[in-house]
Amino acid sequence: MTVSVDGADALSGGFADPPIDAARAFRACLDVMARPGRIAELGGAVPPAPLSVAAGTLALTLLDGTTPVHLAGAHDTAAVRDWITFHIGAPFAGASEAAFAFGTWDALTPVDRFAIGTPEYPDRACTLIVECDALEPRGARLSGPGIKDEAFLSLPEVAAFRANRALFPLGFDAFLTAGTRIAGLPRSTIVEDV
Amino acid sequence: MTDQAYNFAYLDEQTKRMIRRAILKGVAVPGYQVPFASREMPMPYGWGTGGVQVTAACLTPEDVLKVIDQGADDTTNAVSIRKFFQRTAGVATTEATGEATLIQTRHRIPEAPLTEDQILVYQVPIPEPLRFLEPRETETRKMHSLEEYGLMHVKLYEDIARHGHIATAYAYPVKVEGRYVMDPSPIPRFDNPKLSDCPALQLFGAGREQRIYALPPYTQAVSLDFEDHPFEASKAPHDCDLCGASDSYLDEVITDDQGGRMFVCSDTDHCRCRREAGHVGRLGTPITEGVS
Amino acid sequence: MYVAVKGGERAIDNAHAWLAEERRGDPAVAELTTAQIREQLRLAVNRVMAEGSLYDLDLAALAIKQARGDLIEAVFLIRAYRTTLPRHGVSLPVETAQMAVTRRISATFKDAPGGQVLGPTFDYTHRLLDFTLEANGEAPVALRAPAMAAAVPHITSFLNRDGMIEEAPHDDTPPPDLTREPMELPASRATRLQAIARGDEGFILSMAYSTQRGYGRTHAFVGELRIGMVDVEMEVPELGFAICIGEIELTECETVNQFKGSRTEPPQFTRGYGLTFGQNERKSIAMSLVDRALRWKELGEDYTGAPAQDEEFVLMHADNVQATGFLEHIKLPHYVDFQSELELVRKLRAEVAASAMQEAAE
């Protein structure tokens, strides 16, 4: 067994009590996806770097053998792959086939590689997990479903999310993660530069 | 006490993940019906299996669960579903709307305004608002994709031509954020205005028909109508005979075989709270705290 | 003073206790064992296994006992149990050509390699109530033939050799699983077959019967009906080869149906297919007729509007657990909805009355 520098190896770092940990983690994911701009704490998993605690916890909560996953850029490491294979069993896929994609914004762009659903099945769209250095309730102005009046969120870019909103009801959905923090940005959100 | 023979909240983890993914997509596309691989539950299809699966996927041990059927906490199916989650998830339950963090409902929205800290889960029999106009799923799916809702307006207008009113009294369709026409489940149209701009997250589960959909908080859900025939939320023109409420939805109760009847709040918790606060209706008696 | 109905919980507990008592019946009569149900009500067990999509004779017998003989209720119990089971893997397709047949008949050939084996069938019994069963159920010992030495080839394979019947090309696409994925329409043939195999026997029977009476006629002959045991094999990755994990009883029906041919293809017969757990002849024959009727588009036939040709109609209404749940849910309280209609009708009536009054006054 290889042990990585931060102590997380492929066999460790899963949920201590899977049904309960996953239930709490899902509620955090649901909460932030339903209320864009809200930032929640999300923990429980100890994934290998560079996967953040929040992104790893989300992966344990939502992914399984039926969800093709794409690891972009620096996230595509043997340690991350082994960890996902052992704990989740999700098949690895290219950007266009992925149900979930993990990476920094730079690594994920261009985002038009990802599935946006079809007019009859808009749900068949990719969910991006954008790893950020920090998440703050300031920056781009958000409005739309889930938001009372307006909200603000530090986004890596505005133009791509505006273009995504223009595709509605098609489009990708995104979670933004930083350390143990997570925010959601569904395709329905109207994003503006302030 | 949790029944150890079952996983937390009954469903296995893989099933929960599948449902959770569907819920998130539903939230991301408000009003769109996400197909999901509904499981056979230990209660029959048509008895709330969709709502139960959504609730099971959302519950955490910290939740306080309220279950209502027709607005009431003590109807047999509400009792049965509440007991199911007490047994399989060990969660706290309540009848008080304000104390609940997750409310599963059949056919009503509580009278008390919901808050940002609550999730309302609806049991849905027929999720497709166009189903009675077009029985084929292949067709209705196309109609939603093309935003082709003319048929629905024709139907509503035919009602007006025949009866002078839109003759849909419950399951009255709404348009969500100007895009999808959605069935709000068979709530009375009295409840329709509460769907829109609601601080709580609203989730809809249809088990037999294998669909999940959602209204995120503060989402616009507009009841379909016409300029010359605006939507009207209607109720019996009476006050509650127990608590005197003039603005709550009422059940009609036949009290004798001489045509005697009374009207009482369908939301039992709302009625109890009002009576405890000293409100007394035509046939009610004052109740004081500590007396049940 | 009006008091709202309370005590739902107590009513439910008491109703359950009463139900248990009724299930047991008169305690002076010996209790039925699940072994008796498994051995002596085998066809009921087979139906519950087929529609419950779970091959387990003992669990099916238990479900029948618990359901007081209500087979749809028993199917429901099995389904609800099945859905909680973990999935350890997927077996290889069973090889019905290798079946150890207990019954094998063909309506299309008088004799064929392997022969006709009548087996345990009601077919030529006279339907006279046998009152001796009331007294004792002892059965005579049937004569036994030696087991057949070799595998019994499929009748349709003989037709296929001459090009007289459509090819059934080998396909390794993993079939979708309705119990894990929502139904998508239009459905593949594999999805349709799974849905019909799980479907209610009565519904599938009536659909099949309607095609015989002209609603989507397909001129079916039973090319072959075979019943017997087959091995279930599974590849074990650690071993690198397939091992037999058990054997199950199956009924397989292949119908031979008429087909006129098209501009590109010479006339040839077509196929309908049915496969069920256990001895389940009616279901598997009906299944093959419905399968064949649903193939009209693929075979370039006309859609005549027959119910059995309508994929969405058949697939969305074949499941008796869904159907019975939704049907019976109308006994749940609906007073909120009813109240809203009551108010509406009162309002409309008042308006009609008012305008009649006004007309009379004018």
Image (cartoon, coloured by chain):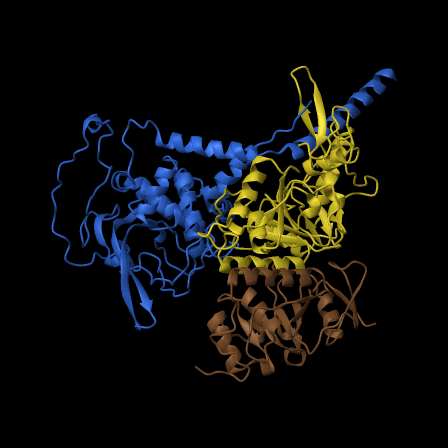
Q: Is residue B251 above or below residue B183?
A: above
**A54 horizontally vs C55: left or right:** right
Question: Which one is nearer the viewer's eye here, B276 or A8?
Answer: B276
In the rendered image of the structure, the colour used to display chain A is brown
x, y (%) of residue C184? 52, 55
In the rendered image of the structure, the colour used to display chain B is yellow
Q: Residue furthest top?
A: B258
**C51 horizontally vs C40: left or right:** right
**B117 horizontally vs B205: left or right:** right
The total number of labels drawn is 0
x, y (%) of residue A53? 60, 73
Q: Is residue A5 above or below residue B215?
A: below
Q: Residue furthest right?
A: C362
In the rendered image of the structure, the colour used to display chain C is blue
Is residue C282 at least partly visible in the picture? no
Residue at x 56%, y 62% (from the top left corner): A22
Residue at x 74%, y 58% (from the top left corner): A145
Question: Which one is nearer the viewer's eye here, B254 or C317?
Answer: B254
x, y (%) of residue C245? 28, 61
Residue at x 18%, y 53% (from the top left corner): C114
In the rendered image, which quarter contains the C terminus of chain B? top right
